[in-house]
Amino acid sequence: MIGKTRRFVLALAASAVLLTPAAALAQDDSFTLAVIPDTQNYVDFTHQTAEGFPFDARELFFEQMRYIAGRLKTNGGDIAFVTSVGDTWQHQTKAFDEAHAGFGVSRGANPLLDAHFAPSEKTRTVEMPTARQGFEIIAGQTPFSVVPGNHDYDAMWTDSRYLPIKDFMNPGDHPRPYGMLHPGGLDNWREVFGAQTEFFKDKPWYVASYNGGADSAQVFTAGGYRFLHIGLEMAPSDDVLEWASKVIADHPGLPTIVSTHDHLSTDGQRAPNPMVDMAMVHPEHNNPEAVWTKFLSRHAQIFLALNGHQHGQAYRADAGAGGAMVHQVLADYQDRGQTAIAAGVKADWPVGIGDGWMRFMTFDMSGETPVIQVRTYSTHYKKYSGEVPEYAAWYRKVEQPKMSDLEFLAADDFTIRLEDFRKRFGNGAK
């Protein structure tokens, strides 16, 4: 498929051991990478019994993390690396990030979203501690990465230049009927996941950081190879991309994976959600296509890019530098709310929870052409997507209404062939 783009609107692994003997590495021909999609609805303080919700949604998040812990390489399992693609929590603590006033940005009124995403002190007392508690379950046992999503910023407001239309209930073809949200400030995020936190400080596998850890790099060994992972903040500016390029230059020859919050849309385009297009608000940001042009496509070491943010799944592969393929994968299941329906939740709008669904990407490096088996698993239902008879009926109409049931099932259970991997990276450690 070299030179062609493949799309489906549809958990990468790595070893925690950095100094594994070469002989052992050569025999380690299978591993799994766990990809944690947006967890915001699990940790949302309004989705807990203390606020009158019928169950504590955070328990589904903890259940995911305990499941991952049980499958870690260090615990005798197959998961070698864990990446969280952002929107770790839901709410903010500030109404506006004053630093953005210097960009000519100001806050406008948005009756619908101002109420839904009103800043709350419970972000600090409930949501941030819950996120920290979840990752403490795997801390010290494996290399992992967490990148910030728009909900993880200190503030998220409606740009005064892009206000919601009056009749937002009947949007028609308007590109931004609900207005344009913009996030700013990452002090809260750095407090939980910054480079100086206990999660990452002095860890030998945490090899670089920028902006206090909003951007970071990790290394891990698995499948006979040493891998580099780079986590990027949402809509990174040029200086961030320059930093990431230097990290790659400092680790020559390593197969490289990139995680960021926003990259593919649910139709497989490199396009931002029109309601959160940071590059439109001020141009120091790069939209997904610009990130592809300026960074992802320019480095032959990058073979895989992962994201969340846009509700659903997608896959595409494109040739980058020198014809090297970059496989791009979206997974975000935050809108899935069968658990809320089963608990009797009544609401004018569907209540997204996540239902325990996440991605596992299992690498089989034993053949001449390595492959990745991409599967979607719910730690709540304890089943893979194809094992749930109601799967398409529950989720397809919201996530992929243009797909058939069979196409939808295939979008959450498919194989990626790494046709050019050996040519690019050799045969690994021998």
Image: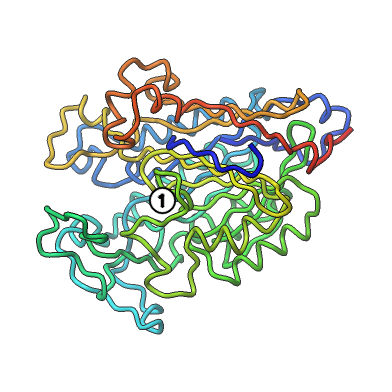
Q: Residue at x 64, y 61 (%)?
A: 209
Q: Residue 89, position in %: x, y?
A: 38, 50
* In the image, residue 104 above or below residue 258: below
Number of residue marks:
1
Q: Residue at x 46, y 49 (%)?
A: 264
**According to the image, label 1 marks what residue?**
87
Q: Which of 356 and 275 is in front in this view?
A: 275
Which image quadrant for residue 74? Answer: top right
Q: Which residue is drawn at 67% across and 49% down?
A: 302
* In the image, residue 107 above or below residue 72: below
Task: Answer yes or no: is residue 72 visible.
Answer: no
Q: Residue 276, position in %: x, y?
A: 35, 60
> What element does badge 1 sit on?
loop
Q: How crowded is the residue under tag 1: few (<14 C-alpha within 10 Å), some, or many (20+)?
A: many
Q: Which amino acid does label 1 sit on?
A: Asp
Q: Is residue 63 left or right of residue 167?
A: right
Image quarter of the N terminus: top right
Q: In this view, does 324 lie to the left or right of 43?
A: right
Q: Which of 268 and 80 is in front in this view?
A: 268
Q: In this view, does 77 lie to the left or right of 377?
A: right
Q: Nearer the viewer, residue 425 or 337?
A: 425
Task: Answer yes or no: is residue 299 visible.
Answer: yes
Q: Residue 100, position in %: x, y?
A: 39, 78
Q: Residue at x 87, y 33 (%)?
A: 21
Q: Nearer the viewer, residue 177 or 5?
A: 5
Image quarter of the C terminus: top right
Q: In this view, does 17 lie to the left or right of 363?
A: right
